[in-house]
Every structure is written in C-alpha cells, then in structure tokens.
Amino acid sequence: MPERRDWTEAADNTIRRMRADGATWAAIGAVLGLSRNTIIERGRRIHAAGGPVQTQRPPRPPEDDPNRGPLPAGHPISWGLLTAGTVLEGVAYTPLSAERREAGR
C-alpha cells in the first residue's frame, strides 16, 4: 500500500499556479518529484483549474458523416477504395452512356 503523503500549502499552491498557467499534470509532477497520477488526484481534490488548451477538432467532411447516405457509383472515395493497389489505381471512373450500355448487350 502506498505511503500516506502530507500535502503542504506550498505544494498545493504550486499545483494551482502551474495548472492555471497551462502546465500538464506530468510537468507539475516532475517539478514536485511525484508521479503524474498522484498530482492528478491531488489537483482534483483541491479543484486546480486550467491546464493545456484543448483545440477543437475541425468538423468532419460530409463524406465522413456516419449517418450520410450511400455514395453514388464512381464517387472518388469509393472508387479509390476499390482500385487502390490494383492496375486501375489512378484511372478515373467514367460511367457508360446509354448507347454504349445498349451496344454491350
């Protein structure tokens, strides 16, 4: 079982100050000579706010929406998946005209 740690006001102030300045839990742990998880637990108990700025992910392109409808035949995404690594790689999909479809029958 881990040893009990008596936290000092100076250590708590260091956690609060560094966290408010945007430091990561690991950086604070390195300064105090403690593990990241120990600092995370103490920071939560003393309500240390702040941390690294989280950048928001850019929105997904419409093709990547999991609720979108099926892609049409020959769409660059689906065609690229089908032809990657084959002799057709890089060949653009061109649908047959009505006359060519009739001539092929």
Image (cartoon, rainbow, N blue to C red):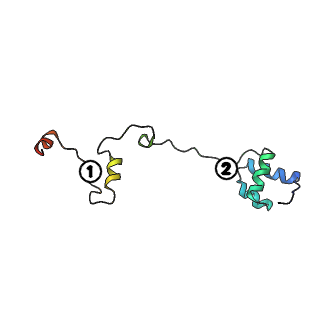
Residue at position x 43%, y 40% in the image = 62
- Residue 100 drawn at (x, y percent): 13, 43
- Which one is in front in this view, the residue at disc 1 or the one at disc 2? 1
Q: What amino acid is labelled 1 in the image? A: Ala
Say which quadrant the N terminus sits in: bottom right
> Callout 2 environment at 10 Å: few (<14), some (14 to 19), or many (20+)?
few
Question: Is 27 placed left or right of 81 in the picture?
Answer: right
Residue placed most toward the observer, 28 or 37: 37
Helix, strand or loop under label 2: loop
Label 1: which secondary element: loop
Q: Is residue 80 above or below residue 3?
A: above
Apparent side of residue 103 relative to residue 52 in the rendered image (left or right): left
> What mark, if any, has residue 52 been given in the picture?
2
Q: Which residue is mark 1?
A: 92
Q: Nearer the viewer, residue 66 or 13?
A: 66
Figure disc tally: 2
- Image position, residue 32 (x, y; %): 80, 59
- At 84% from the left and 54% from the top, the residue drawn is 11
Left or right: residue 71 compared with residue 27: left
In the rendered image, which quarter is residue 89 located in?
Answer: bottom left
Amino acid type, callout 2:
Pro
Judge from the rendering whether residue 78 lies leftward or rightward of residue 33; answer left or right: left
Quarter of the image that includes the C terminus:
top left
Q: Position of residue 81 (x, y in %)?
A: 35, 52
Gap in angstroms between the C-alphas marked 1 and 2: 45 Å
Q: Residue at x 74, y 47 (%)?
A: 20
The residue at 75%/61% (across/down) is 30
Name the N-terminal-most of marks 1 and 2: 2
